[in-house]
Image (tube, rainbow, N blue to C red):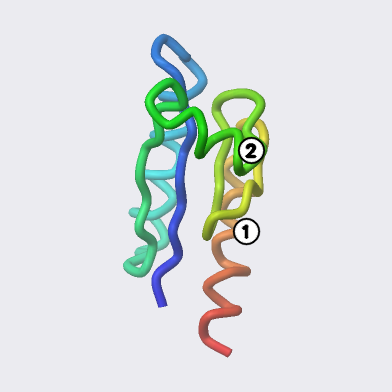
Amino acid sequence: MTIKVEVFSSPGCGKCGHAKDVLRNITEDEGFENIQWREVNILEELDYAVELGVLSTPSIAIDNELVFSSLPSAKKLRVELLARIGQDNS
């Protein structure tokens, strides 16, 4: 099963670029092959962002659920992804 990770960002957001880099590094370091991620520009998809409860950027949703409403540490993001992958294997 694939885990869908979305990074909500806005143009000119410096932390948003960092969030994307952190996610990319974690998926590469851990060898996560079943993670599908995409960048969501909140200005282009405002209704979707509001529907999930995104109030600030960067925010991260996993499987259509807002999990981090601000930039998490790499460790917290890694733990969350590993927990969800563990759920997939059961």
Q: Which residue is mark 1?
A: 80
Q: Position of residue 75 (x, y in %)?
A: 62, 48
Residue drawn at x 52%, y 86% as measured from the top left? 89
Q: Position of residue 64 (x, y in %)?
A: 54, 55
Of the 4 image quadrants, the one containing the C terminus is bottom right
Q: Nearer the viewer, residue 15 or 8?
A: 8
Residue drawn at x 55%, y 28% as measured from the top left? 58
Q: Position of residue 60 (x, y in %)?
A: 55, 42
Q: Amino acid at mark 2?
A: Pro
- In the rendered image, which quarter is residue 53 located in? top right
Residue drawn at x 58%, y 78% as measured from the top left? 86
Numbered label attached to residue 10:
none
* Crowd around label 1: few <14 · some 14–19 · many ≥20 (10 Å): some
Q: Position of residue 9 (x, y in %)?
A: 46, 26
* Crowd around label 2: few <14 · some 14–19 · many ≥20 (10 Å): some
Which residue appears farthest toward the bottom when viewing the image?
A: 90
Q: Is residue 25 left or right of residue 80?
A: left
Numbered label attached to residue 72:
2
